[in-house]
Every structure is written in C-alpha cells, then in structure tokens.
Amino acid sequence: MARPAPALRVALLVAYDGSDFAGFQSQANGRAVQDVLEAALGRLYGAALRVRGASRTDAGVHALGQVVSFDLGDPALAGRIPLDRLPLALDGLLPPDVRVLGARTASASFDPRRAVRKHYRYRLLVRPAPCPLRRREVWHVPPPLDLGAMARAAAQLAGRHDFAAFAASGGRVGSTVRHLERLEVRRACPDEVHVEAVADGFLYHMVRNLVGTLVEVGRGRRRPEEMASLLASRRREAAGATAPARGLCLLAVEYGPEHEGPWLRAGAGDVDASAARAIE
C-alpha cells in the first residue's frame, strides 16, 4: 500500500491593521486575523485549512512581520497555485486591512511559535494636539517628555531579567524570565518617538507595560533609577499603566538557521527590507 504524500508546510509573511480586530487568534466573540486568513485560504484551495501564528497579538495591535504557517495535505492542492503567486491570489479574497506579503515552503518541523527573536515597535505622538490621520497607529502623549530619562530607564530594563512586574494577568507561561536584547527610545521624526523592543519572547502585555512605565519616567513621575527595584519587586502594580494597543506593531519574527529564507532567518535585518524582498 502506497504511503500518502507528506503535507507541504507553507509559511506566510502577513501584515495587518489591527484596529478592527479582536486580536490574531480565533475566538468565540470578535473578528480575528486568523479567521480572515483561514476563510481566504479556504476559498482559494476549496478546503478547510488551519493557520498557526507566531504571535497572538492583542486587539488593536498591528503587524508588518507576522509569520504564520499552514499545511497542504493534498498534493493536487499544493500544485494548484505557485507559491510566488499566492500573495497576489489572496489579494482579492482578503479584506483591505490584511495582506500576505510573501509565501514560501517551510520544513515539516517548522513551528511559527518557536521563534528565536521578536521585534516590536511602539509609536508615541509627542505634540500638543493629536493627529486624526495617525490616531489608529500612535499613542498621543502631549509634551513635555524627557527622552533622556526614558533612555536611561530603558537601559536598566534591557538584558535578561524576571519581567513579572511587566506581565499582565491572563498569560499562560511557566517562567517570566526573558532576554530583552534591546529596548531603545529614539526620536523618529519631529513629533514621533519610537520605543523599539527586541527579545527572545514577550509576556502578555509586556511591551505595552514597559512603554507605559517609560512614559511615566518621561513625564517625571518616576526616576530612571527605580527600574532595578521595580524588576526585583515582581509586582505588576509596581509598574506603570498599560499603554494603548493602537501604538504597538509587530515588526519581525526571526527563526534559527535551520529555517532559511529572507524573512525567517535570524539576523535578517530590518523588516521593511525583508518585506520588500518577499514581494519581489
């Protein structure tokens, strides 16, 4: 008896505006990115396909570099559409707030959740009045904001620490220790400040809680030198308020060297360049 052909695992690079989503993961109540992707793939292939995402982004959180995977078990389905044409084929089936930027084959062992590094960016709009054109993408924080103090606080938070003080309840993890490789506060343009966060993984609401705390430092409500004791406390109530979801974007997800590809390889570089290569 002939063995069935092995399933073809496909990895997708996905971008979305999270404003009108209840998050990435499928849920009983609310529109989810996963549901939209599965519906489009189902219409395209004529079969029910399940996608798995690298990050379960919250309601309102955006993505430029989300990575998902799905399996095509039927060889006939796998040959129906060349993978380099898959993003274009999905364009007409997806709503305007979701796009697939790239598609490639992945090894059978590839699991998008087993990333070695994730990169998030949080955007702060620092000016007296909000901007209606950017209201879905930034957190408006009126000046003054001491960026030097925020940078000093961020430097104390970078490294391998127990981030229990920055983890919201509801997360399902065994350990709250993470290696925060980079936490950088920089002025991106005259009225925007970006907080870049790169780590081997993040706890539930961790980036938003870090940003909320850094903003309190920038407003003079906390001293940068308090960060070490805040970490040591392991108490969520000791840290700052949770920043709004709308300012957060998942820029990139990276994997080990066994998963080669322009937007899977660890150290692939800036997500915008990676996305451009995927589109070409």
Image (tube, rainbow, N blue to C red):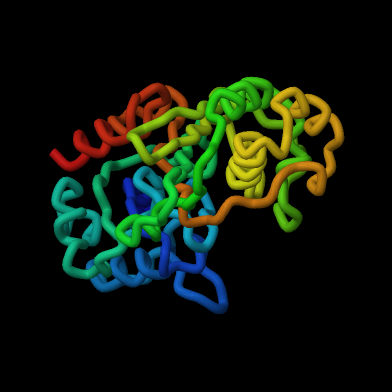
Instruction: Give the left or right position of residue 144, taking residue 41 as reference.
Output: right
Considering every residue shown, the one lying at the far bottom of the view is: 29
Q: Nearer the viewer, residue 197 or 65?
A: 197
Residue 269 vertical position relative to residue 210 in the rendered view, above or below? above
Which part of the image, by quadrant, shows the C terminus? Answer: top left
Q: Position of residue 44 (x, y in %)?
A: 23, 68
Residue at image location 30% in from the left, 65% down from the top: 41
Location of the N terminus (image quadrant): bottom left
Mark yes or no: residue 68 visible: yes
Classify residue 200 as left or right of residue 260. Answer: right
Q: Number of marks in the image?
A: 0
Q: In the image, what residue occupies the spot 16% across and 60% down?
A: 89
- Residue 1 is at least partly visible in this image: no
Expressed as whole percent of the image width and height from the top left, the position of residue 211 reads 59, 41
Residue 92 position by quadrant: bottom left
Locate residue 199, reporting x and y percent.
56, 30
Q: Is residue 109 left or right of residue 154?
A: left
Q: Position of residue 108 (x, y in %)?
A: 42, 41
Q: Is residue 157 above or below residue 93?
A: above
In the image, 267: left or right of 224? left
Near-viewer residue (137 or 202): 137
At 27% from the left and 42% from the top, the residue drawn is 104
From the viewer's side, name the closer residue of 50 and 151: 151
Q: Quadrant of residue 51?
A: bottom left
Q: Residue at x 65, y 49 (%)?
A: 204
Task: Say if 226 sits above or below 58 in the image.
Answer: above
